[in-house]
């Protein structure tokens, strides 16, 4: 995009960003809202042995589609591709709300329908998340991008806190179906704003989509997500199912790499990884997702069991962590815009995040809520240094024509890291717990769910022993997380600080006629 295009688009940038923020909020809020509605859904449909797939199907759809959406935006223009993803997300939301209704055959197939519709919703959500980042990259020069990406990190923090609260309110006062229907009016507002105000460069291309690469990547990612979901939970790590999925993922990804080397427009250009900064920040994103999503799952468990907090306000339990993340994200975003420098922030963020994880290893039965809150603030601050700068560095490492692919890859590696982290830390937690006195607090039902009522009925001395074993297992998880977060500042040290551009470059595929229109301030609409 030329400087003239940027100037021409400037009057609408804030309005467009408002629409983008709504779209991003939809994608981030959805999983948090739905998690609180799951007990009601299971109560109506049954299918307790399959209910986790309501979440897994969404995660799978999002993860598989993220790199594909990014590349489609690069090829065919981000506006039309992004609006399509919003439409798919809203269609999936409407269908989820209708699952098991009389219109679709009644509740007997309700759980199966809901899982299928959640996958559709996840496909749309993948386009929402990568599309927002890439469009900001089109509208805002890298020098100013940190401020807006800091706002995105703030939205993530707000969504993680507000989601369970909103979901609980909707489920209690309306119906679990409104956990999905609530997306429709908000999505409608986002669509209206973006259709009428968003003007991006128009791409003309005769290239074909790399369907073979997209298919192989989807198979490989699906196998990996299933391994991280089922491994050590539904199936043993050495079971034929998990080993078979591992072989399938390896074969699919190796074949994907071979295909991507030969096609003219690869879904995930492997040449991007020849760039040192991009390769390093992709690995940092993986480790960030690994430690962040993996370890964060255990904070509410600690607070609800060891500290006796109510699950009703579970969203508030992570408020200190989100506060640290929100404040630092906004401050760092403005600092990057003002100075144009960013290399120090992922280094500092890795050190602070490691310190936060190290502090959380000290959690025990005597830790006060104030202490644990302070520990979470430190962890959140470290995340705030990293969340936006990782995306900024990824985007600044590539040409404008590969912005979508780079944004998709950055999001993808963070998501895959989170899947691995949740799985590995869950296995570590279960192994540590199995050999402790806390093992008796687990029910014998499927999945080894924590029986909180049984825990409350134990004599005081026995309960203290159980809680001691439980807090030990949780702090042990954070100790393992330190081993991964400590690698982040080491990797970040080798990032080369490339000056942030103060204006976006013109699209490589713009025709002479389009360049003439841009020069006249008539930027064509995608």
Image (tube, grey):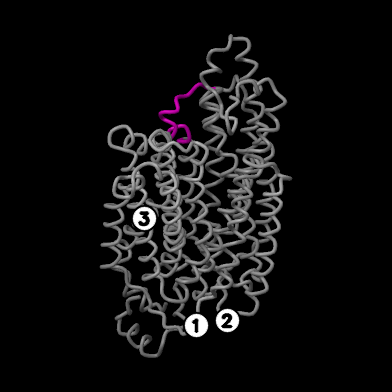
- Report the side of 433 relative to 398 (left or right): right
Mark 1 element type: loop
**Mark 1 closeness class: few <14, some 14–19, many ≥20 residues within 10 Å:** few
Q: Nearer the viewer, mark 2 or mark 3?
A: 2
Q: CA distance from mark 2 to mark 1?
A: 8 Å
Q: Which of the two residues, 457 or 525, is positioned nearer the viewer here?
A: 457
Q: Please provide the residue range marked out in magenta.
A: 307-319
**Residue 374 rendering spot, x and y as whole percentages:** 53, 32
Secondary structure mostly seen in the magenta stretch: loop
Assess whether residue 118 is covered by the magenta stretch. Answer: no
Tell me if residue 511 comes above or below residue 161 in the rendering.
Answer: below
Mark 2 element type: loop
For the point 38% across and 79% down, the residue is 202
**Mark 3 closeness class: few <14, some 14–19, many ≥20 residues within 10 Å:** some
Assess whether residue 318 is covered by the magenta stretch. Answer: yes
Q: Which of the two residues, 330 or 119, is positioned nearer the viewer here?
A: 119
For the point 27% across and 57% down, the residue is 188
Q: Badge 2 is on which residue? A: 264
For the point 57% across and 44% down, the residue is 292
For the point 58% across and 71% down, the residue is 213
Label located before the other in sequence (3 or 1): 3
Q: Quadrant of residue 368?
A: top right
**Mark 2 closeness class: few <14, some 14–19, many ≥20 residues within 10 Å:** few
Label located before the other in sequence (2 or 3): 3
Q: Quadrant of residue 341?
A: bottom right
What is the number of the mark on residue 207?
1
Q: Which of the two residues, 17 or 105, is positioned nearer the viewer here?
A: 105
Q: Badge 3 is on which residue? A: 21
For the residues bearing labels 2 and 1, Cβ distance under 8 angstroms? yes
Q: Quadrant of residue 265?
A: bottom right
**Residue 489 rendering spot, x and y as whole percentages:** 66, 51
């Amino acid at each position: 995009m030329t400087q003239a295009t940027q100037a021409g688009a400037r009057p609408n940038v804030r309005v467009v960003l408002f629409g983008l923020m709504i779209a991003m909020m939809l994608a981030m809020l959805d999983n948090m809202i739905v998690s609180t509605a799951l007990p009601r859904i299971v109560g109506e449909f049954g299918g307790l042995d399959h209910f986790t797939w309501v979440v897994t199907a969404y995660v799978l759809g999002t993860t598989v589609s993220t790199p594909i959406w990014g590349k489609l935006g690069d090829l065919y223009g981000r506006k039309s591709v992004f609006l399509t993803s919003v439409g798919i997300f809203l269609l999936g939301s409407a269908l989820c709300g209708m699952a098991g209704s009389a219109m679709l055959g009644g509740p007997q197939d309700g759980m199966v329908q809901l899982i299928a519709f959640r996958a559709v919703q996840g496909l749309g959500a993948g386009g929402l998340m990568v599309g927002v980042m890439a469009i900001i990259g089109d509208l805002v020069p890298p020098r100013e991008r940190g401020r807006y990406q800091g706002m995105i990190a703030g939205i993530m923090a707000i969504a993680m806190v507000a989601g369970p609260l909103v979901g609980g309110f909707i489920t209690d006062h309306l119906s679990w179906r409104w956990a999905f229907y609530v997306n429709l009016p908000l999505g409608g507002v986002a669509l209206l704003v973006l259709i009428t105000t968003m003007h991006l460069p128009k791409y003309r291309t005769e290239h074909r989509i790399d369907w073979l690469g997209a298919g192989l990547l989807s198979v490989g990612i699906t196998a990996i997500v299933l391994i991280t979901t089922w491994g050590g939970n539904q199936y043993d790590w050495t079971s034929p199912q998990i080993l078979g999925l591992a072989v399938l993922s390896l074969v699919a990804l190796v074949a994907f790499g071979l295909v991507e080397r030969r096609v003219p427009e690869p879904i995930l250009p492997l040449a991007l990884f020849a760039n040192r900064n991009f390769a390093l920040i992709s690995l940092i994103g993986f480790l960030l997702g690994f430690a962040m999503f993996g370890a964060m799952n255990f904070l509410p468990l600690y607070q609800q069991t060891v500290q006796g907090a109510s699950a009703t306000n579970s969203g508030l339990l992570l408020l200190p962590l989100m506060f640290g993340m929100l404040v630092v994200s906004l401050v760092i975003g403005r600092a990057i815009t003002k100075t144009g420098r960013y290399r120090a922030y992922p280094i500092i963020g890795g050190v602070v995040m490691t310190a936060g994880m190290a502090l959380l290893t000290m959690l025990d039965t005597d830790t006060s809520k104030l202490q644990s809150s302070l520990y979470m603030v430190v962890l959140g601050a470290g995340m705030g240094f990293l969340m936006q700068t990782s995306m900024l560095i990824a985007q600044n490492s590539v040409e404008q024509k590969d912005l979508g692919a780079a944004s998709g890859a950055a999001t993808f590696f963070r998501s895959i890291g989170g899947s691995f982290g949740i799985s590995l830390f869950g296995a570590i937690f279960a192994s540590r717990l199995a050999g402790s006195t806390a093992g008796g607090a687990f029910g014998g039902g499927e999945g080894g769910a924590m029986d909180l009522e049984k825990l409350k009925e134990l004599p005081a001395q026995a309960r203290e022993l159980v809680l001691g074993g439980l807090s030990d297992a949780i702090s042990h998880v954070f100790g393992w997380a330190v081993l991964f977060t400590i690698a982040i500042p080491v990797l970040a040290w080798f990032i080369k600080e490339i000056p942030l551009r103060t204006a976006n470059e013109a699209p490589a595929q713009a025709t002479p006629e389009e360049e003439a229109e841009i020069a006249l301030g008539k930027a064509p609409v995608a």
